């Protein structure tokens, strides 16, 4: 079947065996490139530690961590 790309600024006609219209192949490739760029921007960020991890790593005095360790 022949469809029209669902991207408003594209409207390219393409052939597909799908039941509904989607992005044309060139728009799909563009979306993949943009997704990789976004992944590269956000993936390298280190994860922040959870409160449980901070508690477990804090130095303990008589089995309890100092409250000063958790002041933000």
Image (spheres, rainbow, N blue to C red):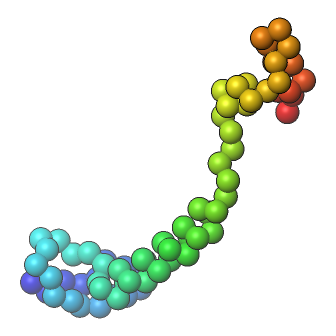
- The single residue placed furthest to the right in the displayed view is 68
Residue 68 sits in quarter: top right
Which residue is located at x 18 percent, y 83 percent? Answer: 3
Image check: 1 left or right of 64?
left
Point out the image quarter for the N terminus: bottom left
- The single residue placed furthest to the top in the displayed view is 62
The residue closer to the viewer here, 3 or 63, is 63
Compared with 43, 63 (above or below) is above
Compared with 22, 24 (above or below) is below
Which residue is located at x 43 percent, y 83 percent? Answer: 30
Image check: 59 left or right of 11?
right
Which residue is located at x 64 percent, y 62 percent? Answer: 44
The residue closer to the viewer here, 3 or 38, is 38
Which residue is located at x 24 percent, y 84 percent? Answer: 4
The residue closer to the viewer here, 67 or 25, is 67
**Residue 39 appears in view:** yes
Q: Where is residue 7 in the image (x, y as percent from the top left)?
A: 36, 79
């Amino acid at each position: 079947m022949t469809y029209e790309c669902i991207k408003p600024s594209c409207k390219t006609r393409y052939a597909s065996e799908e039941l509904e219209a989607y992005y044309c192949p060139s728009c799909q490739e563009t979306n993949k490139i943009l997704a990789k760029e976004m992944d590269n921007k956000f993936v390298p960020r280190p994860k922040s530690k959870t409160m449980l991890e901070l508690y477990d790593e804090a130095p303990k005095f008589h089995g309890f961590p100092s409250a000063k360790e958790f002041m933000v």
